[in-house]
Every structure is written in C-alpha cells, then in structure tokens.
Amino acid sequence: MARVNGADESGRAEHPRRRELSWAWMLPMLRVEGAVAMVKRKRTTVPAQIVVLLRGALYTELARACEDAPALMPEAHERTGWADVLVRIERARGALDAIGWEAPAEQRDVTIALDATMIEALEDAWDGWNWLAQQEKTESAEGRGQARVKAETIARFLASVTERPSPDTPKRGDA
C-alpha cells in the first residue's frame, strides 16, 4: 500500500507508534488507587443462595461507603477526601455488575472471578448474621435460627474458596 502524508490508500492515517501503544503493553501501568485494574483470576461457581446473600452484602457496602463520605471542609471539597470512598463504591459497583444488581425471579448459580470486595462483603455479612443469631433478648427464636442458617451458609462457602484474592479494598474507617 502506498502512503501519502502518513495515510494509506483508504485515507486512514496510522499513528507511527500504534503497535507500541496497545493496551497490553500498558497493562502493568493500569492502576486504580493501588489495585491493578485488570487481573486474571480463577473463576468460581457461586451457589444461588450465596449470590443472594452477596448481593445484600454489596448493597450494605455501598451504603457504608456513602456514610463514610467526607462531610467537613476541606476534605469534602478535595479529591483526596473522596478517594477511598469512591474506590469502595466503584469496587462494589463492579461486583454488583458481575452478579447482577437486581434479584431475578429465580436466582441461579453464577460463575464469576471472586475479588477481594466480594470476599470482604461476605465476611462482613457473616459477622452480622452470626451476631444476630446470638441476640436472645432482641430476636425471636425463629429470627435467630434464620440468621444462624445464613451465617453457616456463608461460612461453608468461604471455607470452600481455595484461592482468595488479596484484601486491597479500603474498608470502612480505613484512611
């Protein structure tokens, strides 16, 4: 193909360093607040019952991240004041994108690459359900039993996860 002023016969010009600028070449530099944006992870089939509990835990993480938003000046008017909150929101959003934001009429198992946000959300959910299962004064026997079943279900699933991603998600209160 003949080139005229950097363009081929179709009239399209190619950047002289196009091959050097591919995304694969830049992968080591793609970082979001200290975490690699694209990481190859092992895919895991998450049982439907866990997907339901995970979705609720991720919504809780979104709410907690919003609660931790800076309210006082100057942090509320500076990017650094919002950085950790926005990273947490973005990670929870990504996890919800992976499992689905809305519960379908019949939840099915989901095969996904678990990330630290999902694991930490499930660990937090286990902690909450486990605590609730022990509240004899405020919870009915039926409510405690349901909480115990949910905590045990999460514990069994977490015990079955052989490869855990590194916990790099800013957690509530970390800064």
Image: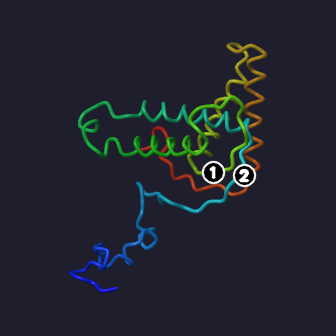
Residue 11 falls left or right of residue 121: left
- Crowding at label 2, few (<14), some or many (≥20) Cα neighbours within 10 Å? few
Q: Quadrant of the image for the N terminus?
A: bottom left
Q: Amino acid at mark 2?
A: Val
Instruction: Find residue 98 and report its image quarter.
Output: top right
In this picture, is 153 found above or below 2?
above
Q: Residue at x 56, y 52 (%)?
A: 167
Q: Amino acid at mark 1?
A: Leu
Q: Which mark is residue 114?
A: 1
Whole-angstrom CA distance, mark 1 to mark 2, is: 9 Å
Residue lying at the far front of the rendered structure: 9
Query: x, y (%) of residue 150?
Result: 73, 31
Q: Residue at x 74, y 18 (%)?
A: 143
Q: Quadrant of the image for the C terminus?
A: top left
Which residue matches tag 2? Answer: 161
Q: Nearer the viewer, residue 49 or 172?
A: 49
Contact flag, marks 1 and 2 (Cβ < 8 Å): yes
